[in-house]
Amino acid sequence: MKLASYRLAGESTWGIIEGDTAFHVGKTLSGRYADLKGLIAAQAFGEAAEARTRSARSPLAELEWLPVIPNPDKVFCVGLNYETHRKETGRAVVQHPTIFGRFANTQTAHMADILQPRVSTNLDYEGELAVVIGKAGRYIEHEHAFEHVAGYACYNDGSVRDWQHHTHQFTPGKNFPQTGAFGPWMMTPEELGELAPLRIQTRLNGEVVQDATLGQMIFDIPTVIKYCSSFNPLEPGDVILMGTPGGVGVKRTPPLWMKPGDTVEVEIERLGTLRNGIAAEA
């Protein structure tokens, strides 16, 4: 099942995506689940599937996409989680995942612009797999981690590199408005299937700039879920970004920055393609 958040005729809702059609299940179940996070918290995917048959539908072209989860309680980001990226940054091998946070209000949607901020031109791409948490938990053990996953999505964890590198703390460069693109939809685990062989690719203006498989992650999903849930409880709708492969713009010679007028895509095999333009902040 593919589930997305979007606006339809100016009203925020959510629905099931099949091919080129959106079934507006959120409108059908609006009295029960105000948003996609509410459906996930209730583990009501079966109810959503049943409501699909009696829901209005529209072509995808009529939607204004929203971030898959517009209002997550937390967005955890895993840094340096592909060996190719660790090596290109010169960072040492570590025994635990490198975790930092992204604020929910820095997210943007599929087909919306990623913004180059006024204070920098060093806007970099980072194609990533997003894990959407479906069941709350604390101190989640490795063998139970996937029981807490509601689905997966594409994410572009855009980075303002000079601000990221002001100090050893990543937070400023990772939290400019409209730099974290999330979409178009999330796919439930049973539909996506085995993750390891799936290809993740980032393209800037059609040129491949990152290319890897999800199986190349250093710390796998259960390890990251166990680690994050040990220091903070996970809640339904929380998002974990699983890190980016090598090939980032900052490590190229000369550096390759995203700039106004560019188009960037993050594609994960079988999951979908997240597409964004780049615009200057007003």
Image: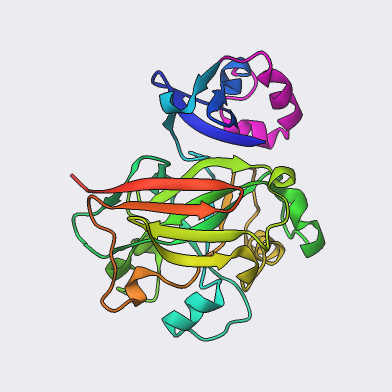
Which of the pair 115/99 is nearer the observer? 115
Q: How many marks?
A: 0
Residue 29 is drawn in which quadrant? top right
Residue visible at 48% across and 83% down in the picture: 87
Would you say 265 lies left or right of 80 here?
A: left
Q: Would residue 204 be counted in the magenta stretch?
A: no
Q: Is residue 241 above or below residue 26?
A: below
Q: Residue 239's spot in the image, x, y percent?
A: 57, 50
Would you say 154 lies left or right of 221 here?
A: left
Q: Which residue range is magenta in the image? A: 30-56
Which of the pair 212/225 is nearer the observer? 212
Q: Which colour scheme appears in the figure?
A: rainbow
Q: Confirm whether residue 44 shows in the render.
A: no
Q: Is residue 247 above or below residue 239?
A: below
Residue visible at 68% across and 42% down in the picture: 188
Q: Confirm whether residue 39 shows in the render.
A: yes
Q: Is residue 155 above or below residue 186?
A: below
Q: Would residue 44 be counted in the magenta stretch?
A: yes
